[in-house]
Amino acid sequence: MEKKLEFKKTNYKLMIWTFSWVATLALVTFGQIFIWTEENKYISIIGLILNVLVGIGMIYTNRDLLTKMDELQRKIHLESMAITLGLSVIFGIAYSTCDSLNIIPFDAEISILVIFIGLCYLTSVLIGNRRYS
Amino acid sequence: MKNKLRVLRAEFELTQADLAERAGVSRQTINAIEKGKFDPSLPLAFTFSKIFNKKIEEIFILE
């Protein structure tokens, strides 16, 4: 029971860190457009440093969550991370190369890769859970 | 790896949830082990050994 409570607590902490990371990124991205001007680049730089620091906190909390999972859950998530990393590198580079070689009529956007990573990870976890059920 | 977890669970009148609670793992893990889809780690095997008061070799059989 204690392990479950610890897991829930860490899961909640990860949610807070993730939300904070997204919020700081949104602040920097839209802040320069709507709040401060391009001349005040130092504010954007401070915002970006804050975003990176929050991101590092998010990574540590994610690692902490992994240690609090039970062994099957940890196996599923680590396998999912491995698959996601592999697919993201392969398809990310292929996508970027398509842009360099003008195979695609638009610029390769990093947001597409981020969405791809998220979908890969989610799908892998779902398949993993199904495999062991 | 084959195991006698389901049989022992029945002997001790434990549900999967009860055993999961005692072993400190999820019910999904217990279910996966019983179906032979997942092999437990050594510490978990020792935990089962303690719960059922049996040797690890009496619970798990190497195929």
Image: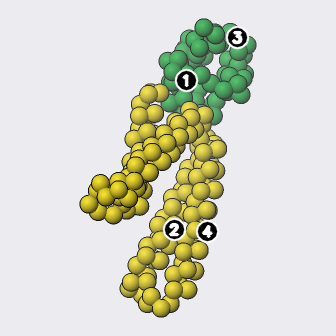
Res A2 label: none
**Residue receiving disc 2:** A20
Q: Is residue B51 visible?
A: no
Would residue A118 appear left or right of B17 to someone viewing this image?
Answer: left
Q: Say which element carries label 3.
A: helix
Res B57 label: 3
| Discs 2/3, front | 2
Point 56% across, 35% down: residue: A75
Q: Are marks 4 and 2 on the same chain?
A: yes
| Label 1, residues with CA under 10 Å away: few <14, some 14-19, many ≥20 | some
**Residue receiving disc 1:** B38
Residue B42 to residue A76: above or below: above
Q: Colour of chain A?
A: yellow
| Label 4, residues with CA under 10 Å away: few <14, some 14-19, many ≥20 | few
Q: Say which element carries label 4.
A: helix
Q: How far apart in space, not on screen, are marks 2 and 3 (Cα)?
A: 49 Å
Q: How far apart in space, not on screen, are marks 1 and 2 (Cα)?
A: 36 Å
